[in-house]
Each structure stands twice: as C-alpha cells, then as structure tokens.
C-alpha cells in the first residue's frame, strides 16, 4: 500500500464511519418498533412506522406543507437572487468584496442568531409593528404565521442561491449584455433569452441547495412559527428529542431522505436530457 | 417630441435605477435581523420594544459576569477549537493526496468526504443520537467533538483541495530533488504556500462548529451544553433573556468582521 493512502485514512474514516454509517443504522431502526410502554426496541422487523406515517393525515399534511414551503422559498430566493448576483458580477465594482462578504454572514452564523433577530423584528412589540404604530398604521401578525416563516427562510438561505449564481455568471463574457442590446434586444429579452439560459447551471445548483436546506430546516420554522406550525424539521426533532420515539423519528427521517434523494436524481437526469437536446 | 434615442436612454436609466433599488432591498432583508439583534442588545429594558426607550450596555455587562453563559461559551469554544484542528489536519492531508497523487477511486473518495454538505444533517443527527446512546457517547465531549469534526471536515477538504490545485507542484519537486526530506518540504514549502487556504478552512470550521445547533441539540446533553443549544432551548421555552442578545450581537460582530477580512484578503466567497 503506498504511504499516500495512509494520509487519506483519517478523513475517510471520519466521513465513512461517523457520517455515512449512521444512515445505514437509521434505515434499519426505521423498521423496528418500541416495546409497549418502553423506550427499548422490540424484536422483529415491521412496516408499522411507515404505515402510521402514511395513515395519519397529520404527518401527510406536515410533509406537504414542508414541500410547499421549500418550493416557495426556492422560487422567492431565485427571484431575489438573480438580479443580486448579476449586480455583483457586472456592476458592483469596488463594492463587490463587501457585498460578497455580507452574503457569507448568514451562511456561517447558522439559522439561530438571525432567527433571534427576526423574533425582535416581527414580534408584537418588534421593529415592524413598533414602526407601524408610530406611523399610525395597523399592526401585522408575522410571528406564528407562514408569511413570517417564509421571510425567515428566504433570509437564511438566500446566500445558498446567490453564491452559485455569482460563480456561474462570472464565467459569462462581460460584453454579452451589450452585444445583445446592440442588436436591439430589449432588457427583458436579454434576461429571458441570453442571461437566464446561460445561468442555468447556477440556477439548478442554487435551487437544489435552497430546497434541501428549507426542507430539513427546523430552527427557523420552530422559532418564527412559535411552535404553532409543524414542518418536517420541527416534527422530526420533536419525535427524536422529546417524544423519544426513535424508530418513528427514523422512519420520518428516511421519508425525507428518500424525497430529497429522488428530487436530486430527477434533477440530474433532467439536466442531462436538456444538455443532450441542446447538443443535437 | 422625444427622440427614440432619448427614450431608450431613459428606459435604460430607469432599468438600472430599479436594479440598484432591488439590491438595496435584498440586502436590507438579508441584514435586517442582524441589525435588529444588535439594536435590541443595547436596549436597556428586560423586553425589547421598538422604539427603544433607553440604550445601555447593561446586558453586555451581565454577559461578562454570568457564570452560566461563560461556561456555555467556553464549551462551544473548546469544541470548536478541537473539531476545527482535527478537521483541518485530516482534511488537508486528504486533499493533498487527492490533488497530488490522484489515487484510484479519487472521485468516490471525494464524494464520501463531501457527503455532509449534500445529505441532510438533521437526518444524520437523528441516526447519530441513537448510535451515541448505544455506545454511551451521548453528552460526552468526545461525542460532541467527533460530530463537529465530521460536519466541518467537508469545508476543510473543499477549501484545501482548491488551495493545493492552485499551488504549482514544481516547488515541491525542486525541493525534493535538491535533497529535502518530506517533512522539510511540508514545513518549508507546502505549509507556507497553503497558508491562506489553511487560515480560511480553520476560520470556516471554527465558525460552523461554534454556531451548530442541528446536531448538538440532539447529542450535547446537560454537561456539555454549547451556547447555541442553550439559546435554542431558551427560544423554544420561556422566552429570551436579554443577556443572550448581547452575546449574540457579539458573535455576529465577530462573524461580520471575519467575513469582511476573509473576503478582502482571501476571497472567501469563491472558496465555499
């Protein structure tokens, strides 16, 4: 064995044993059940957890709601991020470094500290409602509503959309827009027919990142939903951390994993098909 | 009557103006919660209300004397330093071999190493919690550091991979052919050239570990409760202690500073 392989081992062991192996464990415990009135696992394998998941409309509703939040957050992030990424690449000049640095902040701060800020932004005595009261406007209820959660999700995960877009757009020729404009294309057509198709790899990469992050998030929906709105993340967390029904939490986690996996496979196949079509 | 050319410039100007306005609004939304967090931490009252009645440093003073928060921040720091050190060392070694030796199956190895960035951490945390419980690792420092090392490792691998790809192998080859031992090549050639990457991956690992709540919340236990776990249980339960606002504002300030310095000197956004 060449000595270089030995240098790979520590990292590989950490990833394979501590990260990947638990997924196998998860798959197996999801087919177990707890003995009556106990936290210990009963003997034998069964589909009980999955049957319970599909039979109970509550969990189906939770999964559908989470799916809806993920789709909406992805679309909103894309709408907000495209002009931002375009600006950073083409027009920011000296501001470019600062604008990119600010994008990194929510990425490394995690969802918790921004949620703490959001709580004081949206709360009944918070900045938004305090300002409306000062101006004599009616107050708005944001905390504990889907709107509040969606604002928090877009804020937290916007960088996951912006950064891949910036990387893709930066590779396009700088005079692309002028070239299209000089041929008489209006701004909307330049976006729709030139920039967007060329930015597609970044759009796909960013969308997958935002979708998966939203689907599995639990801090933002928990804190901004004030415990009133159940999503996959909050329910999975509750089952694992408080109800302590680990086999059921495992089954729930497996369902999310399979949904995310299927989505990624679908997108990979889809973009390959599109590329093949374009090549012809 | 306006000529066509003037109309066109006007439309272009309007379009460009709207674009700038869009950027301002987007960054406003992005930074609003952070700004509010900082503002709220200076509010003198026990419950933040807008507009603030009086500003003071009261909660910052409370943060420095509170034993509870000092210990939580201490635990977070210890875990972050240990995890980041292991992750950067293991990640750099692996990235170096992958870039310079390109072993068979390199793509599979890379996929395994980067898996924590692709697979959902909450799903993994639910699994890890059960295994830790079986191995009695729940609520231990070892368990916490091991988990944090795994979530920071892919950042270290990816950043160091990009770093080594940018370093021309000719320097190492020259030193070796002149008779330098591998250890000296590493110490005198590779590490100095890879320093920006090493600093970037260390900073990222430290920040990601320090701020983690997804995994820690399920495995930390009472004895090694990190600051984010403490804050999260507060947010879920009895409400916000303003002292945590002051600490949160301090952490955000450090992150802001790190991000700006890192972006301006080492182009962080391109490495993530």
Image: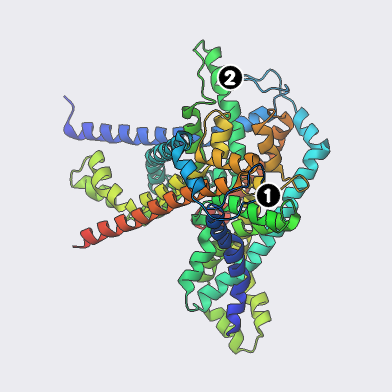
Residue A119 lies, with reference to residue A103, above or below; the image says above
Give the class, few, some or many, for how many residues have Cα within 10 Å of label 2's Cα (few <14, many ≥20). some
Residue at the extreme top of the image, as rendered = A136
Rendering quarter of residue A117: top right
Disc number for residue B219: 1
Question: Of helix, strand and loop, which one carries label 2?
Answer: loop
In the image, what residue occupies the spot 74% across and 51% down? B139
Q: Quadrant of the C terminus of chain A?
A: bottom left
Q: Is residue A105 visible?
A: yes
Of badges 2 and 1, nearer the viewer stands: 1
Question: Could you say where residue B160 lies in the image, as x and y percent from the top left?
Answer: 56, 65
Q: Chain of mark 1?
A: B
Residue at the spot of label 2: A124
> How much space separates mark 2 and mark 1, taking CA atoms?
34 Å
Give the quarter of the image for residue B131.
Answer: bottom right
The answer to whether the residues at label 2 and label 1 have Cβ atoms under 8 Å apart is: no
Residue A151 horizontal side relative to residue B18, left or right: right
Give how far across and how far down residue A136 sits, in percent: 51, 10
Which one is in front, A194 or A116? A116
Can residue B162 be spotted in the picture? no
Q: Is residue A35 above or below residue A268?
A: above
């Amino acid at each position: 064995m060449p000595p270089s392989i030995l240098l790979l081992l520590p990292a590989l062991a950490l990833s394979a044993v501590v990260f990947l192996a638990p997924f196998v464990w998860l798959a197996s415990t999801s087919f177990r059940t707890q003995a009556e009135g106990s936290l210990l696992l009963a003997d034998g394998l069964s589909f009980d957890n999955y049957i319970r998941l599909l039979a109970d409309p509550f969990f189906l509703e939770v999964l559908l709601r989470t799916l809806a939040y993920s789709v909406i957050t992805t679309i909103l992030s894309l709408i907000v991020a495209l002009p931002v990424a375009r600006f950073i690449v083409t027009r920011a000049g000296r501001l470019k470094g600062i604008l990119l640095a600010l994008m990194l902040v929510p990425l490394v701060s995690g969802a918790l500290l921004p949620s703490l800020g959001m709580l004081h932004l949206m709360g009944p005595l918070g900045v938004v409602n305090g300002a409306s009261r000062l101006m004599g406007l009616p107050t708005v209820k944001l905390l504990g509503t889907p709107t509040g959660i969606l604002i928090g999700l877009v804020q937290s995960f916007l960088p996951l959309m912006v950064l891949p877009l910036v990387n893709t757009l930066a590779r396009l020729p700088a005079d692309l827009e002028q070239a299209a404009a000089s041929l008489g294309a209006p701004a909307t057509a330049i976006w729709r027919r030139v920039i967007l198709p060329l930015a597609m790899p970044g759009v796909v990469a960013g969308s997958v990142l935002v979708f998966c992050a939203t689907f599995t998030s639990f801090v933002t929906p928990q804190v901004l939903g004030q415990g009133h709105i159940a999503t996959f993340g909050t329910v999975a967390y509750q089952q694992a951390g408080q109800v302590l029904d680990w086999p059921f939490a495992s089954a729930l986690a497996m369902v999310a994993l399979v949904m995310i996996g299927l989505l990624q496979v679908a997108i990979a196949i889809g973009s390959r098909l599109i590329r093949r079509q374009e090549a012809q | 009557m306006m000529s066509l050319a003037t109309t066109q410039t006007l439309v272009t100007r309007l379009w460009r103006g709207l674009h700038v306005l869009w950027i301002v609004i987007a960054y406003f939304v992005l930074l609003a919660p952070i700004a509010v967090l900082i503002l709220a931490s200076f509010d003198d009252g026990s419950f933040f209300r807008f507009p603030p009645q009086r500003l003071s440093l009261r909660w910052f003073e409370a943060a420095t004397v509170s034993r509870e928060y000092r210990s939580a921040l201490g635990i977070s720091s210890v875990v972050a330093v240990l995890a980041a050190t292991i992750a950067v060392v293991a990640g750099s070694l692996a990235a170096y071999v992958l870039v310079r030796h390109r072993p068979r199956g390199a793509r599979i190895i890379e996929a395994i190493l980067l898996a924590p960035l692709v697979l959902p951490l909450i799903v993994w945390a639910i699994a890890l919690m059960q295994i830790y419980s079986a191995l009695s690792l729940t609520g231990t420092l070892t368990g916490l550091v091991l988990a944090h090392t795994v979530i920071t490792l892919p950042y270290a691998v990816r950043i160091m991979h990009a770093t080594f790809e940018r370093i021309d192998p000719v320097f190492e080859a020259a030193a070796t052919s002149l008779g330098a031992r591998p250890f000296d090549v590493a110490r005198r050639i590779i590490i100095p050239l890879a320093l920006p990457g090493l600093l970037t991956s260390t900073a990222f690992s430290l920040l990601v570990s320090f701020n983690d709540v997804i995994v820690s919340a399920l495995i930390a236990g009472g004895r090694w409760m990190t600051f984010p776990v403490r804050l999260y249980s507060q947010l879920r339960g009895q409400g916000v202690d303003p002292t945590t606002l002051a600490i949160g504002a301090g952490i955000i300030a450090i992150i802001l500073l790190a991000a700006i310095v890192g972006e301006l000197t080492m182009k962080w956004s391109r490495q993530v």
